[in-house]
Structure formats: structure tokens, C-alpha cells
């Protein structure tokens, strides 16, 4: 190859490298496939006689069944386990949480997903998804303790829905942000944005899926395609 040919070949090689780099994205951090057993979770918070089991679901294969009887208050998992160790979520990082859910009842409850605070925390939860008046609703809580509904949409019992939540973690009052996708469509929050600025990190924060609240009503949450990653594409159901 002469000098002139090499001169024109180099930009093409650089373009190919750029294209391959742009197409790549980070791998999934955690796969919560029900076939993996409950050891994939940090631990379980399920009041007796409730249970978290893997069951067969037509068209889905194995899915998680969070069964909360009427006399119980909570049936959730708490945190995730990666490589046999409890995963620690870090400030300054972006995480996406994806899953599919089918609720047996749309009765009011306290939570179906929690980004829950632990340790020496000042927030109960930065964000939570819960049923209010037949609508899946996202609440955002600041350190002051005031909870605000920042999004809601009607859902139907015994119907599968896809959820994806993106979180940039920051302990600053409005330094973090949350994104939400329902059934593959990016949602708009009550303030007119699709990326809600808020505090998203306390001392320790971990995800929880299942059923919390609705005491007096038997509720089952079937959950599939649980994933945690660093991009929407890593986890979208």
C-alpha cells in the first residue's frame, strides 16, 4: 500500500472503530431470572404465610410469584446479589431497573417497587411505585419527609405491563434524576419533564419488588424479566 492509499485508509479505520464503540453498551449488572432461585436477591422480606416462589407462566416460562395473603402486610425481596455478594449501588453512577409485572388486584397499596433507604438515612425512599385509585403511581420523597406524586397511569389487574426506571444517584437535593418507561414508552412527569431532578441517594439504597401494604386484601404480584444495568437497552423487558 502506497502513502496515498494509507492516507485514505486511516480515516475509514477510525470510522469503523468509532461505529463499533458507539454500538456497544455496558453489560447487564444483574439478571433476576426466576430460574436462578432466591439466592439472586439480597434477602427476602415476606411476612408469614406469604411466599416468594418461582412458578410457570404461559408465554413467560419461570416467573416470580410474590403472594401476600390478606392478613399479611409485606411480601418483597430486598436488594440484589451479584457473584454471591450483596451489590452496593454507588453515587455518581446511573442505573436502570427493568421488569414485567402482573398484579392480581389494583387495590391501593404502599409499594410494588421501592428504591428504599437504609443505614443512617434521612429519606424513607427516594422513589416508589404504588397503586392509588386504580393507577400505578410514582411517589418521590425528599429528606423533609414530604411525598409527592410525580406520575400516574391506569393499569388493569391480571395484565402484564413493562416497567423500566432509570436513576442517576446523587445525595444533592436536585442532583440526581429519575426516568420512567411504561410498556416501552418514556413517561412525562407532572412537571412536564421526562427526567425528574431530585435526591436519589441516601446512606444506603436498594431495590425492592413485590407487594407491600394492602393489608386485608390478598394480592399477588407476578414479576418477570428482572434486570439491573447501566443503560435502558441493558434492561428493557
Image (spheres, rainbow, N blue to C red):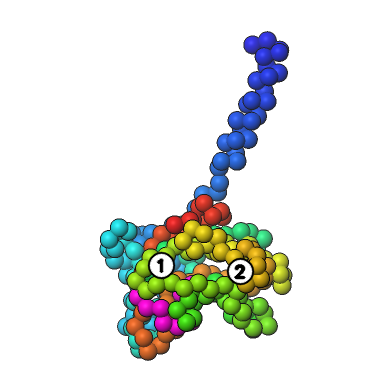
Place of residue 52 in the rendered image (x, y in percent of width and height, measured from the top left): 35, 72
Query: What secondary structure prevails in the magenta region?
Result: loop
Place of residue 173 in the rendered image (x, y in percent of width and height, measured from the top left): 71, 72
Q: What's the residue at 61%, 81% (across, down)?
A: 147
Residue segment shown in magenta: 104-114
Place of residue 102 in the rendered image (x, y in percent of width and height, measured from the top left): 38, 69
- Distance from label 2 to label 1 (Cα)? 21 Å
Q: Residues within 10 Å of mark 1 (few under 14, many from 20)?
A: many
- Residue for badge 2: 189
| In the depicted structure, whether residue 108 falls above or below residue 172 | below
Callout 2: SS: loop
Q: What's the residue at 66%, 71% (across, down)?
A: 191
Q: What's the residue at 55%, 42% (across, down)?
A: 24
Judging depth in this view, the residue of 228 and 177 nearest the camera is: 177
Tell me, yes or no, whether the highlighted magenta stretch contains residue 161. Answer: no
- Residue for badge 1: 101
Mark 2 or 1 closer to N-term? 1
Callout 1: SS: strand
| In the depicted structure, whether residue 13 falls above or below residue 159 | above
Amino acid at each position: 500500500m502506497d502513502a496515498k492509499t494509507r492516507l485514505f485508509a486511516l480515516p475509514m479505520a477510525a470510522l469503523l472503530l468509532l461505529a463499533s464503540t458507539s454500538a456497544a453498551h455496558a453489560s447487564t449488572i444483574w439478571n433476576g431470572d426466576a430460574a436462578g432461585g432466591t439466592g439472586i436477591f439480597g434477602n427476602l422480606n415476606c411476612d408469614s404465610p406469604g411466599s416468594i416462589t418461582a412458578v410457570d407462566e404461559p408465554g413467560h416460562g419461570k416467573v416470580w410469584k410474590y403472594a401476600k395473603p390478606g392478613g399479611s402486610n409485606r411480601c418483597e425481596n430486598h436488594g440484589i446479589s451479584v457473584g454471591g455478594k450483596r451489590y452496593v449501588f454507588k453515587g455518581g453512577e446511573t442505573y436502570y431497573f427493568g421488569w414485567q409485572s402482573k398484579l392480581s388486584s389494583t387495590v391501593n397499596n404502599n409499594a410494588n417497587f421501592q428504591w428504599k433507604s437504609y443505614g443512617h438515612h434521612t429519606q424513607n425512599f427516594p422513589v416508589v411505585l404504588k397503586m392509588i385509585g386504580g393507577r400505578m403511581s410514582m411517589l418521590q420523597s425528599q429528606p423533609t419527609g414530604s411525598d409527592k406524586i410525580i406520575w400516574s397511569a391506569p393499569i388493569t389487574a391480571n395484565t402484564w405491563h413493562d416497567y423500566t426506571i432509570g436513576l442517576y444517584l446523587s445525595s444533592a437535593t436536585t442532583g440526581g434524576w429519575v426516568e420512567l418507561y411504561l410498556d416501552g414508552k418514556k413517561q412525562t412527569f407532572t412537571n412536564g419533564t421526562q427526567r425528574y431532578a431530585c435526591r436519589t441517594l441516601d446512606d444506603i439504597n436498594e431495590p425492592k419488588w413485590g407487594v407491600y401494604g394492602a393489608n386485608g386484601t390478598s394480592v399477588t404480584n407476578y414479576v418477570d424479566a428482572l434486570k439491573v444495568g447501566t443503560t435502558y437497552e441493558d434492561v428493557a423487558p
